[in-house]
Amino acid sequence: MSSTTYMRYELLRTFRQRRFVLLAFGFPLVLYFVVAAPNRNEHDLGGTGLGAPLYFMVGYAAFGAMNAMLSCGARIAGERQAGWTRQLRLTPLSPRTYLRTKVLTGYLMAICSLATMYAAGSILGVRLGAGEWLRMIVLVLVGLVPFAALGVCLGHLLTTDAVGPAMGGTVALFSILGGTWFPVQHGALHDIATVLPSYWLVQAGHVALGGKGWTATGWLVIAAWTAALAAAATAAYRRDTGRT
Amino acid sequence: MSGVALRELTKSFGAVQAVRGIDVSIETGETVALLGPNGAGKSTTLDMVLGLLRPDAGTVSVLDLPPADAVARGSVGAMLQTGSLVRDLTVRELLAQMASLYPHPLDVDETIALTGIGEISDRRTQKLSGGQTQRVRFALALVTNAELLVLDEPTVAMDVESRHAFWTTMRDIASRGKTILFATHYLEEADAYADRVVLMAQGRVVADGPPTEIKAMVGSRTIRATLPDVPLERLERLPGVAHAERRGEAVVLRCSDSDRAVRALLARHPEVRDLEIGGAGLEEAFLQLTAARA
């Protein structure tokens, strides 16, 4: 029995979906160049204290990474529809390993997406120290945990027809309200933003200013979303498979 | 060790009683057919054997374990009635992925040879025809090398040739000492390939025995013909006729061997007209059997 072999083929399968891979990595990249390149000399974007290339790099990286994480839900929905999930339930593969593989695949996609965006950022002149890069990446990866749970949850709740629009809508909403596409610094929108996990993905960029990273609120928001969505994902998984 | 043991198993879906208290025990190494018409409760029973459904009442044990434990140990290989394959892997890759989940899988190349899918082994799963998909699903059940194989209507989507190849492979597998439980609504398949047939109708086991016995029960044909003025006793004495009854000018003969009965009928009563031979049909036979027990 080898879960690494299982994982290897799972990854092979994911990365062979060329159209998906191109869209997942290419779309945020194109948007980034369209939005950030004309403003590359803006050094204090909307009062954030961050230069435009850095702000948008972090924003579009968050956007791409959210998409990549949620795509594990689309794969789950697809496997359910094909009856493959049922077939897998007749194998020694435990539900834990099944979900772990899906989440890890999502993370790997997200990491590739982040790498693409960070490379694009350097092209537009983003310069960070090694420690800053590392801290920012770690914060983003932690901030993606609730999205992994959300992907699993949607994958077990929705059909393949519904899962695409649902994920597109969810990511768009999180992106707009979380300040992914433009800064939200003041007013009611800002108050809403601060309780969203997507806002804190963008805030991970603040380490570039020598900040320590997230405030206590940030950690609390991510923890709360993780707990709530993990509970929802567990419930959705059980309801779907009839397992307890 | 027992292969599969079902005791007073019951399962309802809302108002529909799919399985109404069945008892079946299967020894290890046996090949058993679960025979019955659609809606007899075969799939529901198999789903409970596999642990996909929880019984309302009664118990299931698989190799002396609860189904979930037997599955977790990799002791069960299954081919479900419905389901397609995941895309973007070749047949060989998919088999290797499945094999990686089991403690003692069959060699992937051996499985490919055994199921005769060498020609399509490097093809991506989304490019297979329906019949090819069915053969790959069978290969997926075999690569597990599990002690118990459960197959739900495995040949439904197969053409005659694939069906023949399928059963040849199954014979080979059975000779390796595997326990095999398959559902079918083809009497011929149950007759030809099972050591034992469990006959189900309307959620109950109506008969359980060697194929010849079951075949005699449900494999009968009837002859209808217009034949006035011949006493029923004479017709009942014809070879191959089990029972005769009169309906006006017509007679209905229930046969144990319709071929012999027809020959004898034509030879002795050449005036016979409007001759019709009908298979009693499984469904009809099952209904008679269940009605007889009610």
Image (cartoon, rainbow, N blue to C red):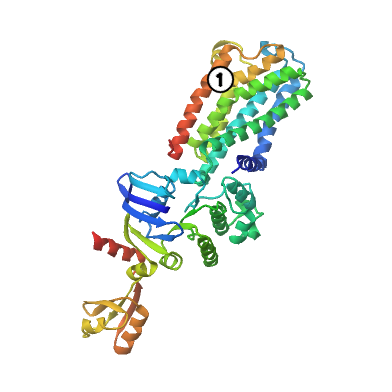
Amino acid type at mark 1: Ile
Residue B197 figure quarter = bottom left
Quickly name the residue at label 1.
A222
Viewer-proximal residue, B280 or B121? B121
Which of the pair B102/A44 is nearer the observer? B102
* Residue A16 to residue B225: above or below: above
Q: Does residue A115 appear to the left or right of B255 in the view shown? A: right
Residue B50 image offset from top left, x and y in percent: 44, 48
**Residue closest to the far front:** B1
Compare residues A165 and B98 and report the one nearer the observer: B98
Q: Please give the name of the residue rendered at 57% of the width and 45% of the height, measured from the top-left corner.
A: B101
Look at the numbered disc 1 and give the secondary structure of its residue.
helix
Give the image location of residue B15, x and y in percent: 30, 46
Q: Position of residue B168 (x, y in %)?
A: 53, 66
Work out whether B159 lies above or below A128: below
Residue A230 point in image, percent of width and height:
50, 27
Residue at image point 38% right, 48% down: B60
In the figure, residue A147 lies in which quadrant? top right
Q: Is residue A23 left or right of residue B179?
A: right
A67 in relation to B259, above or below: above
In this orientation, does residue A181 appear? no
Q: Count residues near mark 1 (Cα–Cα under 10 Å), then give few for <14, some for 14-19, many for 20+.
A: many
Q: Quadrant of the C terminus of chain B?
A: bottom left
